[in-house]
Image (cartoon, rainbow, N blue to C red):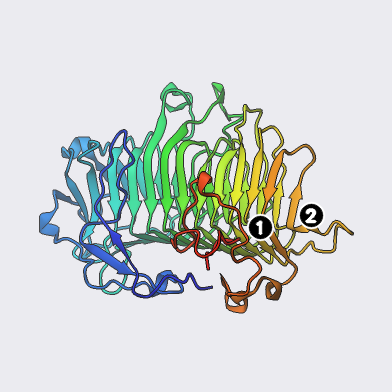
């Protein structure tokens, strides 16, 4: 599958700051650019020479061999300090505690002297943080790899737990994890500091990572039980914390036994975009098999994601009833391309907005909308092709493309349904090129959705071009 980003295009990966209130200027690292191949294969991304790990002599503290617990209080680590993993040392696993920076001067944890490879085989975690805030864990690649910290073999690759908040994770390759690649949440306990209303995980960025071959989720962000809470021995039902201010972008997640990306309890200022989810749900476990799962309590913006080759749903939307999904490309998933419903008792939002997505060859229906306790769902400018359920609904063939549940309020307009990829007139559907040919019936046939703040396509091309908006994720 080609992502169709020009070979000349590069990501400028600029240094960031974690501000308490404004959206952080999230980026990977200063002075480092990574050209991206036109097929967006993470193993084909090449360090162009500008990615250079720092010298270990520049570090505030370099973790010695054999040390597992790095306690910021004991070591006197403070705002602006740099903790280094030395490429010359074979680390097993590392537990960071009390790493506390400030909003404008976070603590940075980074590799030095080259790429660090951690073999955590047999360990419960590879990297874990506890009681830490305003920090960055950043891998800076070299020698042809854009990933500076490579971690494999642990039961969970990375755990961001125990009231960890205001952090950024980037430039890591995590693989062969027994369960999740990255887990970011604090599960509620009998300690009131851990529950909703007392703790919020906020201003979190997880980006430019390569997560693959996991026994559970690739990215597991937030608790799964927003509505009913968690039963905790000794203190009954406890409600999990919210996440506010979350950015998940430019991650490549492949070969996951469960969901590629799962988001939960993410209630405010959420954006998930430009990620690739491929070959997900390999265990074929019902309910744990989606490309991107928007779980209980979650909303936000989900756009420009490439979701392909999975056992379950492409997008599985089970949130608060208020979120927008646009410019996503979903193909060759074994269940529905996009499934949307509600979970919990509400109150729910104004409705889901599903706009300008391209869904090709889902195993069942193209788009399913069951959310009924909302003001109005919006389904506009979607291009749905070759659903597996075509012919299962008798004369109501349109239901295979857009299946709207009883009592689900909906505004639907300017969607194009094609029985075959040939009817849609794609550039090269057989090789996964779903850009439109000049004579495609989807060209210039869309509705103006600038009112929904959609003014570009999957590739960042301005919309509209020509006589009007095109239908689907790509503007001709």
Tell me if residue 315 can be seen.
Answer: yes
| SS label for mark 2 | helix
Q: Nearer the viewer, residue 315 or 157?
A: 315
Question: Relative to 188, is 81 above or below?
Answer: below
Question: Relative to 289, is 387 above or below?
Answer: below
Q: Residues within 10 Å of mark 1 (few under 14, many from 20)?
A: many
Residue 209, labelled with which disc?
Answer: none
Residue 399, labelled with which disc?
Answer: 2
Q: Left of 476 or right of it: where is 26?
A: left
| SS label for mark 1 | loop
Tell me if residue 68 can be seen.
Answer: no
**Residue position marked by numbered label 1 in the rendering:** 337
Q: Position of residue 330 (x, y in %)?
A: 60, 62
Q: Residue furthest left?
A: 57
Residue at 61% x, 34% y: name it. Answer: 350
Q: Residue furthest right?
A: 394
């Amino acid at each position: 599958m080609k992502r169709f980003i020009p070979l000349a295009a590069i990501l400028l990966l600029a240094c960031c700051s974690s501000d308490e209130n404004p959206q952080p200027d999230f980026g990977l690292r200063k002075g480092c650019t990574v050209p991206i191949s036109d097929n967006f294969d993470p193993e084909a991304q090449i360090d162009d020479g500008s990615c250079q790990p720092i010298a270990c002599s520049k570090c505030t503290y370099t973790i010695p061999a054999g040390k597992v617990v790095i306690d910021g209080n004991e070591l006197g680590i403070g705002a602006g300090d740099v903790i280094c993993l030395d490429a010359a040392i074979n680390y097993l696993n590392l537990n960071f505690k009390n790493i506390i920076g400030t909003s404008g001067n976070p603590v940075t944890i980074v590799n030095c002297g080259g790429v660090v490879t951690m073999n955590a085989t047999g360990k419960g975690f590879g990297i874990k943080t506890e009681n830490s805030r305003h920090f960055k864990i950043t891998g800076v690649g070299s020698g042809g790899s854009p990933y500076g910290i490579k971690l494999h073999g642990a039961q969970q690759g990375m755990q961001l737990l125990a009231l960890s908040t205001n952090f950024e994770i980037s430039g890591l390759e995590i693989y062969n994890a027994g369960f999740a690649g990255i887990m970011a949440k604090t599960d509620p306990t009998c300690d009131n500091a851990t529950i909703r209303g007392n703790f919020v995980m906020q201003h979190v960025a997880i980006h430019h990572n390569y997560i693959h071959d996991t026994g559970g989720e690739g990215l597991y962000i937030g608790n799964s039980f927003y509505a009913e809470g968690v039963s905790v021995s000794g203190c009954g039902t406890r409600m999990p914390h919210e996440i506010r201010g979350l950015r998940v972008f430019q991650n490549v997640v492949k070969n996951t036994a469960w969901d590629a990306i799962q988001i939960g309890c993410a209630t405010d200022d959420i954006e998930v975009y430009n990620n690739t989810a491929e070959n997900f749900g390999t265990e074929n476990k019902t309910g744990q098999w989606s490309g991107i799962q928007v779980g209980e309590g979650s909303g936000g913006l989900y756009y420009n994601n490439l979701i392909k080759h999975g056992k379950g749903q492409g997008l599985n939307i089970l949130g608060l009833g208020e979120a927008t999904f646009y410019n996503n490309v979903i193909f060759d998933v074994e269940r529905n391309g996009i499934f949307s419903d509600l979970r919990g008792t509400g109150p729910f939002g104004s409705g889901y907005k599903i706009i300008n997505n391209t869904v090709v060859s889902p195993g069942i229906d193209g788009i399913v909308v069951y959310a009924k306790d909302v003001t109005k769902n919006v389904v506009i400018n979607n291009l749905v092709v070759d659903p597996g359920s075509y012919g299962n609904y008798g004369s109501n063939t349109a239901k295979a493309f857009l299946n709207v549940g009883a009592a689900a309020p909906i505004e639907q307009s300017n969607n194009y349904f094609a029985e075959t990829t040939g009817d849609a007139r794609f550039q090269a559907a057989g090789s996964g090129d779903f850009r439109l040919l000049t004579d495609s019936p989807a060209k210039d046939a869309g509705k103006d959705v600038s009112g929904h703040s959609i003014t570009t396509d999957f590739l960042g091309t301005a919309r509209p071009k020509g006589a009007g908006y095109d239908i689907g994720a790509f503007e001709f």
